[in-house]
Image: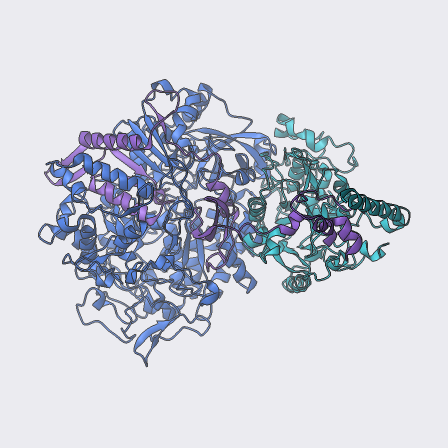
């Protein structure tokens, strides 16, 4: 009865491991962000099929993202990241235009202070402005440094608060959320949410923004091979389906919330009205009759691809190779590796930047990795209790 | 395209996967730019300068597809020696009549045809948007033309084109558009290199292109490039218009437009078309080549469909029943007439002008001055509640207790609650099956108009007034079914298709149309959609079960052709230009045209056919003339008639522009339609003074998450939450200049209105260096209004009313404004602010600045 | 989560033996899923789950009502209500895909904000009131005839026929069916009404 440690860590075909002796091939999503156009059809198609309630009418200012995060009321979430980085355009989009420095980091930092009423708990995370700024500048490697502030003589969007900034001083309101961030390291420049005071076009051009790219990515539950949410669920509401996916059974969930903190991706969330946890089911009902999940069916550009995970992994590897050949060396896969901390994801991604840029953890680890050690103490006792319960039922009915 | 037509965009992504290069030109970096190979920021309203630069690049480097150009276009045709170009006229072609602000087109004609343009100015054509009728066919032109196959004659079209665009250099493109030269050259080089025998390039525009005072000429410039590069009538080529409404193509073909009857037949004009014969001759132009020569059959058959037994050859098929135009009866003229109390009633059928039309305040004031208004919609839209919740109620301009407009709101059936056909953007008709009954009082327009007509006829029964005959003689006997007596949509489609009057047999093609009263056809270009009594638009053979042309999915007009003028996909001898681009070709063994599509050519006319001297109509079309709806069978690089503002596109500044036209002393389109009305105004542009009061350029367009005026998206929860608030996108540089902060408020002021929006400071907007100056542009979505789940000020309120002369479409993709931090004032203070700006800008409402600016000594005169 | 769940629903309808065999803990202890994370944890509801498109009463082949691309839609109906709208995979135009607007079509047609009764605002009134549909139709017809009567133009200044009224206008058609536009144009033209316009002018 003591599980093989492998059940909780390392490569595994999860459906047979979960008792589906005649399981069909494991099914999953491959989301290729290099062809995502950010239309959000996935978000809507998901809501229409699954009857997911509304998730708030707040302008978040996170580029075109007004959903904010995966929540109990948003099972697909399209992230938008504006970055002053090369995008594989033949010549940079703004080359030769009379630009000053980029502002994406500052805007993202301001947006990080916004929140939305999603009707869920914990709902949208209130982001750290500096973390948001890092996303918008392109990965952890160039945090607030090189592309933004350096060599710009303070003329860029990120500048010392004390700097005399002309019109900025006249509109100080938005400095608040961007700068009041003492708990966030406190180092590096602070954000005004404002561009520099230097009149545009006066610069030499060398300091102006020329490169730009707009990353879009449809996020979803990862349907981990080793799903901590499932491991910690005390009611059996979260379970592994025959397709290898992880589903919350709404008729079982009692709203205890253990799964929320267990998820290494921050996917799971509860609805405030009924208290239950809700997330992507990979359209379990559709899969059962051979249909494609609603989001993948709607996706206009095949950014979201659904299929047998093995086949998707091959397809994804080929796509990365193609992109590398075409001069997109930053293309990389995320969540595809069965040897990663969650044994690989059933929903994995092709990204064009570091995972953190998209708000994804760089190295997720199943939070129940060390559970087997505990089982030796707890397992037998629990099973004994369960057996006693069965006996009580049988006895009581006869 | 990714923004407004995401599912269509899958084919661009498909092409990209196969190696196509995608260039995106837009004032702002959009979701399309994000996946394009190259993005070119452009100053709104300068597309002709950019495309003209491409034309020059092609001609200068002799990169045109010479064999195609020689055989299939009018490049070799000799133009009248009376013609004078804008390059010699400071922005004017020969023939300008300052009195009417329109051109006399005699001098634009082909040599020897100077008299065929119809003498006199073209203000009447402008007022009646006559250009619109060329959606199905070219304008009139002499059939026999003089040509110089060497293209060396100084007055051949090729040489005229070369001279006309000579100054549209990369430097000029940069100077006008703000596009750096290297980016422009990258585009021009890629476009030309990917065109020719082996490759085709496609030009895609969304209909924002039409919303300019030179909108038609934008598209003309694109067509010139595509003809020069041999990209017309071939797979993967063409100029593709991405239209914005489910059946806007259908409502143009079967027009709910004042100047057209079905199939692009013109609505008669009181002076030009007093008789049936004169009306028909004005359409078919006796002696002209091409299929339009059968116009008499189409016209007679339409009247026969309308008036049935009452329409006879003896009474000219009741031609006398048709109402007559006397001038401009377009929607903007109507709105001004409403304000002036000249119009009593107004029907709104699934349209929301209070948000969606230019100059929202004029729209709402007009509606507040009606006797009655009928709104048929799914939702309580702004155009139904302006008297209660509109911004003019807040300013005191509309007082509900004093507003006399009687409003009927009638709920409409949705697309799943009725059956019928939509015509999508590529002329494809697709039939929708009815899924459920409409709820409550909701009814289809078919139901509403059928029963309204029935009631009207009942009320007039027995009338002896001649004016009532047209209504009483109308064929109006459609079968009905169901609990609400819904008329049969298929029976209407059958009438649209046309039938043999004596047998009732549905016609198979418009070739069967007769002028003797034996056929009735509701819309001749749609004939065939009900061939053999089968609803061809309802065909849904899976794409998996047919080839990539998918000819058995729906039905495309004309004759189920998927690519128009596809004869051009073969060379003059009838062979495919290349194996890769094989599409339609001549099969000499069978003696007929064949291929993947329905050939857009007479099936058995061989490539070697040459018309006998003096032949007209279809007989006049040679075997190597692919453009069979044109009067000379050729693609027009140069348009001797049909386009009112010039035979060639010319860069004019938008009506509201912060810069002086760098190319000509004539600032803006001299033939544009203007309205001098107290409610209307135009912000000053150079050479006028005070243009600096409105220093910024603004442009508007769609978001993926919303639809037009928001009536079908701000009311729908999963869409409303995706874009929940009105916002304005500004560059970091403008934000600095004006003290705007991300997510804070700003307000925008024009000479018409002030609106507020949340600020998005984004790197996706950039200032441009234009003619040595920095020009800032801001972008707004135009979806917001004051009703629905999410609300906001309407961007279209900022615009005034100035129209393209060819089709009377308003310039609502570019204007000038001021941008200020903070919220707008409310109440009368809002009116005061607009008045203050008008005073500072020297705007006198109702008075337009002079149209002709060549006499002015304004700044930056251009380099001519 | 070593405890199986107590799936109470459905108990009454089952025999005891079936119930026990169906009970997750029993399955967990006797089946292939000793940890109760998969097969054994599946609830009765989950086991019986099927796509609602499967038990639809009917399916209509339709076309998206938003832009002019013309994406194919399949409209599923259950008990007289639209239960799902999704892309039609057979369509050579859209290949089963939809944008967010097309994907929201079910919410559009079933929106609680849809107005489903006739509303009437009297002149100078500050509020809406109800009106019978047939009465409304009758009133509208009367107003059209009156406006036409007041503004009819037989001939121009030179005696040439005009046969028209400029007394009322119409705007709309781009969202409507071809058949509807045909009847609208036909009726208005026969009434002599010229000022018929739609989005194609805008």
**x, y percentage for residue B835?**
42, 23
Would residue C69 be visible to someone looking at this image?
no
Residue B509 vertical placement versus B689 (above, below): below
Query: Taking A94 as reference, is A351 left or right?
Result: right
The way the protein has been coloured in the rendering is by chain
**x, y (%) of residue B107?**
23, 54
Q: Nearer the viewer, residue B229 or B299?
A: B299
Across and down, in percent, residue B275 comes to 12, 48
Asked if residue B535 can be seen in this view, the reply is yes
**Left or right of A291, for residue B470:** left
Quadrant hosting residue C158:
top left
Residue at 21%, 65% in the rendered image: B144
Visual hue assigned to chain C: purple
Q: How many marks?
A: 0
Nearest the eye: B249 or A298: A298
Depicted B682 relative to depicted B559: above or below: above
- Give the image location of residue B232, x and y in percent: 38, 63
- In the picture as drawn, the residue positioned furthest to the left comes out as B314
Q: Colour of chain A?
A: cyan
**Left or right: where does residue B378 sit relative to residue B535?**
right
Left or right of B810 in this view: B293:
left
Q: Residue furthest bottom?
A: B589
Quick check: A306 above or below B598?
above
User: Which residue is depicted at the point 35% across and 47% down?
Assistant: C177
Rendered hue of chain B is: blue
Q: Residue furthest front?
A: A398
């Amino acid at each position: 009865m003591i599980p093989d440690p492998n059940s909780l860590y390392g490569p595994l075909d999860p459906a047979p491991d979960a008792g589906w002796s005649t399981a069909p091939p494991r099914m999953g999503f491959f989301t290729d962000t290099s062809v995502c156009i950010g239309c959000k059809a996935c978000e809507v198609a998901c809501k229409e099929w699954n009857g997911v309630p509304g998730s708030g009418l707040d302008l978040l200012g996170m580029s075109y993202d007004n959903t904010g995060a995966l929540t109990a009321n948003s099972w697909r979430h399209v992230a938008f990241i504006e970055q002053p980085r090369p995008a594989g355009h033949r010549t940079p989009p703004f080359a030769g235009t009379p630009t000053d420095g980029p502002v994406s980091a500052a805007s993202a930092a301001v947006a990080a202070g916004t929140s939305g009423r999603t009707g869920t708990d914990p709902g949208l995370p209130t982001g750290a402005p500096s973390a948001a700024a890092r996303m918008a500048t392109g990965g952890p490697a160039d945090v607030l440094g090189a592309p933004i502030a350096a060599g710009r003589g303070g003329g860029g969007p990120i500048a010392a608060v004390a700097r005399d900034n002309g019109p900025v001083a006249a509109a100080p309101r938005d400095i608040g959320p961007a700068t009041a961030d003492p708990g966030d390291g406190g180092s590096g420049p602070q954000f005004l949410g404002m561009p520099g005071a230097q009149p545009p076009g006066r610069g030499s051009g060398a300091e102006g923004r020329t490169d730009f790219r707009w990353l879009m990515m449809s996020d979803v539950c990862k349907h981990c091979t080793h799903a901590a949410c499932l491991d910690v669920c005390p009611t059996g509401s979260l379970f592994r389906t025959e397709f290898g996916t992880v589903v919350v059974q709404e008729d079982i969930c009692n709203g205890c919330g253990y799964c929320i903190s267990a998820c290494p991706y921050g996917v799971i969330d509860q609805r405030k009205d009924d208290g239950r946890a809700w997330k992507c089911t990979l359209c379990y009902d559709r899969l059962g009759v051979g249909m494609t999940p609603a989001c993948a069916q709607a996706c206009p550009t095949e950014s979201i691809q659904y299929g047998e995970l093995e086949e998707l992994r091959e397809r994804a590897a080929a796509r990365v190779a193609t992109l590398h050949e075409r001069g997109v060396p930053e293309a990389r896969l995320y969540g595809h590796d069965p040897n990663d901390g969650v044994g690989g994801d059933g929903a994995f991604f092709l990204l064009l930047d570091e995972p953190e840029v998209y708000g994804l953890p760089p190295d997720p680890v199943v939070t129940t990795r060390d559970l087997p050690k505990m089982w030796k103490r707890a397992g037998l006792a629990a099973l004994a209790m369960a057996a006693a319960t069965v006996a009580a039922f049988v006895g009581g009915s006869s | 395209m990714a923004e407004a037509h995401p599912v269509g965009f899958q084919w661009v992504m498909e092409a990209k996967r196969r190696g196509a290069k995608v260039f995106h030109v837009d004032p702002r970096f959009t979701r399309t730019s994000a996946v394009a190979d190259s993005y070119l920021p452009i100053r709104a309203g300068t597309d002709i300068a950019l495309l003209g630069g491409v034309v020059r690049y092609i001609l200068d480097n002799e990169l045109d597809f010479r064999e195609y150009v020689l055989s299939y276009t009018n490049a070799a045709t000799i133009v009248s020696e009376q013609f004078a170009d804008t390059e010699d006229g400071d922005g004017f072609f020969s023939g300008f009549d300052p009195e009417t602000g329109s051109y006399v087109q005699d001098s634009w004609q082909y040599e020897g045809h100077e008299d065929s343009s119809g003498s006199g100015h073209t203000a009447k054509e402008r007022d009646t948007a006559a250009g619109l009728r060329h959606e199905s066919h070219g304008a009139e032109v002499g059939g026999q033309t003089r040509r110089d196959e060497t293209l060396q004659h100084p007055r051949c079209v090729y040489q005229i084109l070369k001279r006309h665009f000579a100054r549209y250099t990369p430097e000029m493109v940069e100077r006008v558009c703000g596009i750096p030269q290297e980016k422009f050259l990258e585009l021009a080089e890629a476009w030309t290199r990917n065109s020719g025998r082996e490759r085709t390039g496609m030009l895609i525009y969304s209909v924002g292109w039409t919303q300019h005072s030179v909108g038609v000429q934008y598209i003309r410039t694109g067509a010139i490039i595509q003809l020069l590069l041999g990209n017309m009538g071939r797979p993967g080529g063409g100029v593709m218009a991405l239209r914005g409404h489910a059946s806007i193509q259908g409502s143009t073909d079967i027009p709910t437009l004042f100047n057209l009857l079905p199939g692009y037949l013109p609505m008669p004009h009181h002076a030009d078309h007093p008789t049936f014969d004169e009306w028909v001759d004005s359409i078919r132009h006796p002696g002209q080549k091409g299929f339009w020569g059968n116009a008499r059959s189409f016209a007679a058959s339409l009247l026969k469909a309308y008036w049935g037994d009452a329409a006879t050859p003896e009474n000219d098929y009741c031609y006398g029943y048709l109402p007559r135009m006397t001038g401009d009866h377009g929607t903007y003229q109507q709105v001004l007439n409403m304000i002036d109390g000249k119009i009593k009633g107004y029907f709104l059928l699934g349209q929301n002008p209070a948000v969606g039309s230019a100059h929202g305040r004029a729209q709402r004031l007009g509606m507040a001055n009606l006797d009655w208004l009928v709104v048929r919609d799914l939702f309580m839209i702004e155009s139904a509640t302006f008297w209660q919740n509109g911004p003019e109620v807040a300013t005191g301009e509309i007082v509900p207790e004093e507003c006399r407009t009687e409003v009927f709101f009638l709920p409409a059936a949705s697309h799943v609650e009725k059956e019928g056909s939509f015509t999508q953007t590529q002329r494809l008709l697709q039939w929708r099956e009815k899924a459920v009954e409409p709820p409550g009082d909701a009814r289809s327009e078919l139901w509403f108009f059928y029963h309204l007509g029935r009631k009207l006829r009942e009320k007039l029964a027995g009338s002896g007034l001649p004016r009532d005959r047209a209504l009483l003689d109308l064929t109006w006997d459609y079968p009905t079914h169901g609990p609400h007596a819904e008329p049969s949509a298929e029976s209407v489609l059958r009438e649209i298709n046309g039938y043999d009057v004596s047998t009732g047999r549905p016609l198979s093609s418009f070739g069967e149309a007769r002028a003797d009263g034996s056929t009735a056809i509701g819309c001749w270009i749609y004939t065939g959609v009900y061939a053999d009594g089968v609803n061809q638009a309802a065909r849904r053979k899976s794409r998996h079960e047919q080839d990539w042309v998918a000819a058995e999915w729906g039905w495309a007009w004309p004759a189920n052709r998927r690519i128009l003028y596809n004869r051009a996909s073969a060379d003059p001898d009838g062979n495919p230009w290349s194996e890769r681009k094989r599409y339609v070709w001549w099969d000499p063994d069978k003696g007929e045209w064949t291929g993947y599509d329905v050939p857009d050519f007479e099936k058995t006319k061989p490539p070697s056919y040459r018309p006998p001297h003096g032949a007209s109509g279809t007989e006049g079309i040679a075997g190597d003339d692919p453009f069979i709806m044109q009067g000379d069978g050729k693609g027009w690089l140069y348009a001797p008639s049909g386009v009112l503002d010039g035979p060639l596109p010319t860069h004019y500044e938008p009506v509201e522009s912060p810069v002086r036209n760098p190319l000509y002393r004539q600032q803006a389109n001299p033939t544009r339609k203007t309205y001098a009305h107290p409610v209307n105004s135009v912000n000053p542009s150079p050479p006028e003074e005070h243009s600096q009061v409105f220093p910024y350029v603004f442009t508007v367009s769609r978001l993926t998450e919303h639809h037009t005026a928001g009536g079908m998206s701000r009311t729908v929860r999963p869409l409303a939450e995706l874009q929940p608030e009105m916002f304005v996108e500004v560059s970091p540089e403008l934000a600095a200049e004006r003290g705007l902060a991300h997510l804070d408020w700003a307000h925008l002021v024009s000479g018409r209105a002030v609106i507020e929006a949340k600020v998005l400071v984004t790197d996706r907007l950039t200032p441009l260096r234009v003619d040595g100056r920095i020009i800032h542009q801001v972008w707004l979505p135009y979806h917001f209004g004051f009703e629905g789940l999410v609300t906001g000020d309407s961007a279209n309120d900022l615009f005034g009313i100035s129209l393209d002369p060819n089709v009377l479409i308003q310039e609502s993709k570019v204007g000038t404004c001021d941008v200020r931090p903070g919220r707008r004032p409310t109440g009368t203070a809002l009116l005061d602010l607009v008045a203050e700006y008008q005073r500072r800008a020297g705007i006198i409402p109702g008075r337009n600045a002079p149209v002709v600016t060549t006499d002015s000594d304004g700044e930056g005169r251009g380099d001519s | 989560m070593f405890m199986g769940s107590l799936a109470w629903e459905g108990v009454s309808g089952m025999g005891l033996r079936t119930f026990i065999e169906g009970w997750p803990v029993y399955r967990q202890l006797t089946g292939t899923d000793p940890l109760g994370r998969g097969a054994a944890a599946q609830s009765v509801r989950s086991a019986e789950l099927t796509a609602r498109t499967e038990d639809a009463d009917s399916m209509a082949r339709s076309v998206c009502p938003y832009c002019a691309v013309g994406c194919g839609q399949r409209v599923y109906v259950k008990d007289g209500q639209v239960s799902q709208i999704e892309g039609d995979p057979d369509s050579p135009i859209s290949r089963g895909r939809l944008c967010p607007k097309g994907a929201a079509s079910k919410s559009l047609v079933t929106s609680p904000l849809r107005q489903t009764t006739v509303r009437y605002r009297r002149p100078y009134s500050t509020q809406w009131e109800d009106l019978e549909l047939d009465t409304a139709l009758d009133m509208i017809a009367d107003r059209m005839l009156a406006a036409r009567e007041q503004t009819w133009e037989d001939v121009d200044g030179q005696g040439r026929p005009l046969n028209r009224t400029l007394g009322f206008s119409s705007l709309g058609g781009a969202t409507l069916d071809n058949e509807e536009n045909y009847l609208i144009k036909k009726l208005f033209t026969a009434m002599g009404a010229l000022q018929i316009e739609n989005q194609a002018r805008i």
